[in-house]
Amino acid sequence: MVKQPNSQTVHAKTPSKRDLQHQIGKTRESLGDTVEEIKETAEQGYTAAKETVSGILDYREEFQKEPVVWSLGALSAGFALGYTLGYAHKSSKRGKKSQIVQFADRVVDELSTVGQSLIIPELNSKIRQFFGLDFSELLTDMRGDNRDVGSILEREL
């Protein structure tokens, strides 16, 4: 018997060994269920990630099967985007700059920066390797000189 501060007597029941073992068994089952749920969730996440990655790999396989079709599609999309941005940029010189024209100007500036720093050097090395032509020099000549591209190419080749 345990006496509480207000002098009432409380009978405390101490659990038996059998009750403790039963409680431990329930706890193990509960932990096992929780572990199974976590495992299923992890497997679902893994499966979803695997499907996403395999989708990317399928894209690469499709490109390898039909490179001309995919290249023409990319070229068409690039041409359409470039034409649209060029038209917006051209119309900006005539009047008031709308939000679309300002956006087009920013996109053109960013693409120009990326092109000059990343794409042109790599493209120049590939063109030099395959054709023996210095592409960056060709671009410099075209910017500074009003000759047509054909005469510049003839001189380079």
Image (cartoon, rainbow, N blue to C red):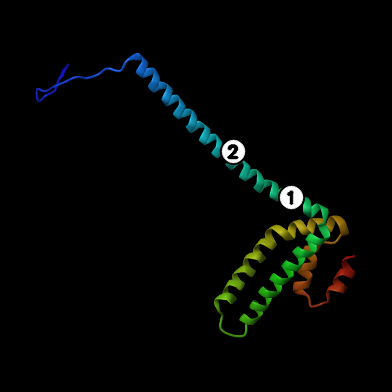
Q: Residue furthest left?
A: 7
Q: Residue at x 49, y 28 (%)?
A: 32
Would residue 61 be found to the left or right of residue 7 on screen? right
Choose top left, top right, bottom left or bottom right for residue 8: top left
Q: Quadrant of the C terminus?
A: bottom right
Q: Residue at x 55, y 79 (%)?
A: 98
Q: Residue at x 71, y 74 (%)?
A: 83
Residue 30: x and y in percent read: 44, 29
Would residue 18 be found to the left or right of residue 143 on screen? left
State whether residue 157 is above or below residue 102.
Answer: above
Residue 16 versus residue 96: which sits nearer the camera? 16
Per the model, the C-alpha gap separating discs 2 and 1 is 22 Å
Would residue 150 be found to the left or right of residue 33 on screen? right
Tell me the element at label 2.
helix
- Residue type at mark 1 is Asp
- What residue does disc 1 label? 58
Q: Residues within 10 Å of mark 2 (few under 14, many from 20)?
A: few
Tell me the element at label 1.
helix
Q: Are marks 2 and 1 in contact (CB under 8 Å)?
A: no
Disc assigned to residue 115: none
Q: Quadrant of the N terminus?
A: top left
Residue 5: x and y in percent read: 11, 24
State whether residue 93 is above or below residue 51.
Answer: below
Disc assigned to residue 43: 2
Residue 88 versus residue 147: which sits nearer the camera? 88
Residue 145: x and y in percent read: 78, 75
- Residue type at mark 2 is Glu
- Which of pointers 2 and 1 indicates the residue nearer the eye? 2
Q: Residue furthest top?
A: 17
Q: Residue at x 65, y 43 (%)?
A: 50
Q: Residues within 10 Å of mark 1 (few under 14, many from 20)?
A: few
State whether residue 2 is above or below residue 47.
Answer: above
